[in-house]
Image (cartoon, helix red, strand yellow):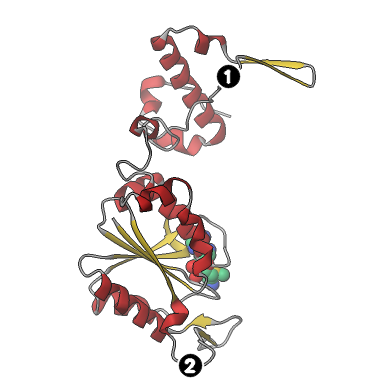
């Protein structure tokens, strides 16, 4: 999978050099290139923004550097491309969406700053470059720039690429896979004391009875989802089968 990220703060994306995504890059599972938008400016100050037409606060990112950067990426990696535009006014980013995006051969992420990018850039990408342009929101809040959103999206998408997470089974029962949140997890020691208070691992997990453990975990997933995210349970396929009472 090829990923290109365009930003005025390429150093922000340095976190993609470490941990599982960094290893996946070194192993050749992810081909990720970060570009500095200012490399596509032509003035002494490497200007990427200007005042908004129509007035109002803040600055808007100029179209020309963006068009040059996108055109450069298109020449580097021609072929079907989806442009992901992080914006609070985009489609909410979810696990289902990450699973959709992992099948794309080429994703380009355009990290906005200030009040965002001149709207005509998206028309250029769709019409002249023939890219599929998708505005995507990380959540209902406003960040200072698209970089943090891109870090989250690349990590969520990248870990779905076969081979990136060592044990593929660990992807199956996670929160947001199959509509429920994950069950609580524990490790050694079974008996743990701190500040004079003993805290035990639930005995069922020490029983060795795999079917009983699976049943307990499923029940925990239902209860946790009901308590923390009842909105998920309402649409969950497990709702009817388990007939759990989620009235507050
Ligand atoms: N004026 C814009 C608005 O109200 O929609 C917000 C601009 S924000 C200060 C600057 C940049 O941060 C955006 O262009 C976008 O790239 C990024 N950003 C902010 N919030 C985001 C979110 N919830 N999801 C994804 N990207 C976000």
Image quarter of the N terminus? bottom left
Residue sitting at x 51%, y 27% = 246
Q: Which residue is mark 1?
A: 188
- Quadrant of res 30: bottom left
Q: Quadrant of residue 121?
A: bottom left
Q: Nearer the viewer, residue 188 or 28?
A: 28
Which is more toward the observer, 173 or 238? Answer: 173
Residue 143 at what x, y percent from top left?
Answer: 57, 63
Numbered badge on residue 67 = none
Residue 103 in the image, given as x and y percentages of width and height:
26, 51
Dot 2, crowdedness within 10 Å: few (<14), some or many (≥20)?
few
Q: Is residue 87 above or below residue 186?
A: below
Q: Which quadrant would the C terminus be assigned to in this image? A: top right
**Rendered location of residue 85, percent (x, y):** 40, 66
Element class at badge 2: loop
Q: Report crowding for label 1: few under 14, some 14 to 19, many 20 or more residues within 10 A (C-alpha).
A: few
Label 1 vs 2, first from the N-terminus:
2
User: Which residue has dot 2 on it?
Assistant: 43
Residue furthest right in the image: 196
Give the alpha-carbon distance from disc 1 to disc 2, as whole Å: 60 Å
Could you tell whether 144 is left or right of 63 in the image? right
């Amino acid at each position: 999978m090829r990923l290109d990220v365009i930003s005025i703060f390429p150093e922000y994306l340095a976190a993609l050099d470490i941990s599982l995504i960094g290893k996946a890059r070194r192993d050749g599972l992810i081909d990720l290139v970060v570009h500095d938008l200012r490399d596509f400016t032509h003035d002494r100050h490497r200007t990427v923004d200007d005042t908004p037409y129509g007035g109002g606060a803040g600055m808007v990112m100029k179209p020309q550097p963006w068009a040059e950067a996108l055109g450069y990426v298109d020449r580097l990696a021609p072929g079907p491309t989806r442009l992901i535009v992080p914006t609070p006014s985009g489609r909410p980013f979810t696990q289902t969406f990450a699973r959709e995006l992992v099948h794309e051969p080429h994703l380009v992420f355009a990290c906005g700053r200030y009040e965002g990018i001149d709207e005509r850039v998206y028309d250029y990408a769709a019409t002249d470059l023939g890219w599929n342009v998708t505005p995507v929101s990380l959540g209902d809040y406003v960040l200072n720039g698209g970089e943090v959103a891109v870090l989250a999206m690349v990590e969520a998408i990248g870990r779905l690429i076969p081979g990136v997470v060592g044990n593929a089974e660990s992807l199956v029962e996670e929160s947001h896979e199959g509509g429920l949140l994950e069950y609580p997890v524990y490790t050694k020691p079974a008996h743990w004391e701190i500040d004079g208070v003993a805290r035990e691992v639930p005995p069922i997990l020490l029983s060795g009875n795999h079917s009983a453990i699976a049943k307990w975990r499923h029940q925990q997933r239902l209860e946790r989802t009901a308590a923390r995210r009842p909105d998920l349970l309402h649409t969950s396929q497990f709702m009817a089968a388990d007939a759990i009472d989620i009235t507050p």
